[in-house]
Image (tube, grey):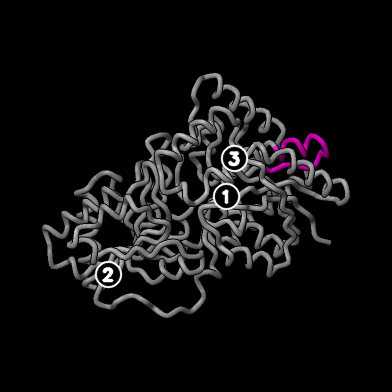
Amino acid sequence: MPHKVLVIAYYFPPMGFSGVQRITKFVKYMKDFNWEPTVLTINPRTYYAFDESLLKEIEDLQIRIVRTNPKDPTQKVFAQSKLKNDFTRKILNRISQTFFLPDNKRGWMFDAVKAASNLLTNEKFDMIFATAPPYTCFRIGDALKRKFNVPLILDYRDAWLDDVLSWYPTPFHRAIVKKMEQRVLLNTNKVIVYTRHIKEHLLTRFPFLSSDDIKIIPHGFDEEDFQTDFQSSKRKDKMRLTYSGVFYDERTPKYFVEAVKRLFYERPELSNKIEFCFVGNFKKKYEKLISDPNLFNAFNIVGYIDHKESVKYLRDSDVLWLMIRHSKNPHLVATSKLYEYFGTKKPILGCVPDGAASQLLKEYEASIITHPEDIDGIKNAIMKFYDLYSTNQLPKPKDEFVQRFSRKTLTQELIKEFQFQLEA
């Protein structure tokens, strides 16, 4: 008989974007290692993007999904129409982080605990696995462990107290959240993080944790996503450089666009030899950056497409662009998109600060790294990549490095932690 795990995940398909990828792929491969997942999540009414292809992957495997109503303000306030207005979104975020602790998903906790309690009362589960953000998921897992004494494993997709998107109006707010995190960590059996930097951060912040309490399991890529055939849409006489993801707040394309302007000024012949693709929601305010006729024809605004189609776009590109520009705790950030880039084995232009992402890009080797605001550095990197492309000498990464991030292999590492807790 397979073991059973209750997975607590607020963000889950049909919701889209990179935040759902890690848990979706963990759940997808759990059955391969004799663990049967049941996913507790929300019934999303609105969201920035939906991806039915990811949901189909899970439904085709007949994995049980238990949904409850979210009961949080973001399902109405942060609908897709609000995404267009950064100022409004920032103000609402500030209000939310003032009155809703640890996050604005706390309204989900009552219904989630009720639904999970019904499952745990009527069935035997061997493990509870909660992934965050939102950190309300950790509090739900904590409440269930205290009630049913089932082992609890937490999966940090970001640092809780010092999440790069967190904001505390007073020291009192910060102290409350720290106390919440400490309470949960004192009650958990194991902590999973995706970078060494987050592990070191937790060990420093909470001295009662030991190194053995925290396991590093990075983000990854699903090899199955890279094995399908597709028809190329790329012109053979142009180098395609692609960015996949969203821009918001500090994550802006303006430095990159300025670098392209300077590139075309210095080498105008390249304006017809490079195609810059943006795959994902692209706000109108950013379209103004490329309104110059000398730039517009070089940019391809693809828009939001489902995960499988976005992977095809990555595979159909010559160079990929990654940008991270968080001013707070940048050393903790290595976006999940980076690992999917690794799966393509394409060269990467990494516009990132020193930290987790830059270290990984150095190990990948097929990369050029610049500071995210270094316009001339970005310009020179694009130029270098084009010169390598034109002579068929674009760099390639080491296969052994890339294979470290296979989703199935990473799920196997997670299942080992499940087994250790059962045998403890």
Question: Could you tell which of marks 2 and 3 lies nearer the N-terminus?
Answer: 3
Q: From this view, report whether residue 412 is shown above or below residue 201.
A: below
Residue at the spot of label 1: 217
Q: Is residue 43 magenta?
A: no
Residue at the spot of label 3: 73
Q: Give the alpha-carbon distance from disc 2 to disc 3, as whole Å.
A: 44 Å
Residue sitting nearer the eye, 87 or 184: 87
Question: Could you tell which of marks 1 and 3 lies nearer the N-terminus?
Answer: 3
Q: Is 158 displayed left or right of 298 in the figure?
A: right
Q: From this view, report whether residue 80 is shown above or below residue 345.
A: above
Q: Give the alpha-carbon distance from disc 2 to disc 1, as whole Å.
A: 34 Å
Given this view, does label 1 or label 3 mark the residue nearer the observer? 3
The stretch in magenta equals 140-153
Q: How packed is label 1: few (under 14 Cα within 10 Å), some, or many (20 or more)?
A: some
Q: Are marks 1 and 3 in contact (CB under 8 Å)?
A: no
Q: Which mark is residue 239?
A: 2
Question: Could you tell which of marks 2 and 1 lies nearer the N-terminus?
Answer: 1
Q: Secondary structure at mark 2?
A: strand
Residue 92 place in picture, x, y as percent: 49, 36
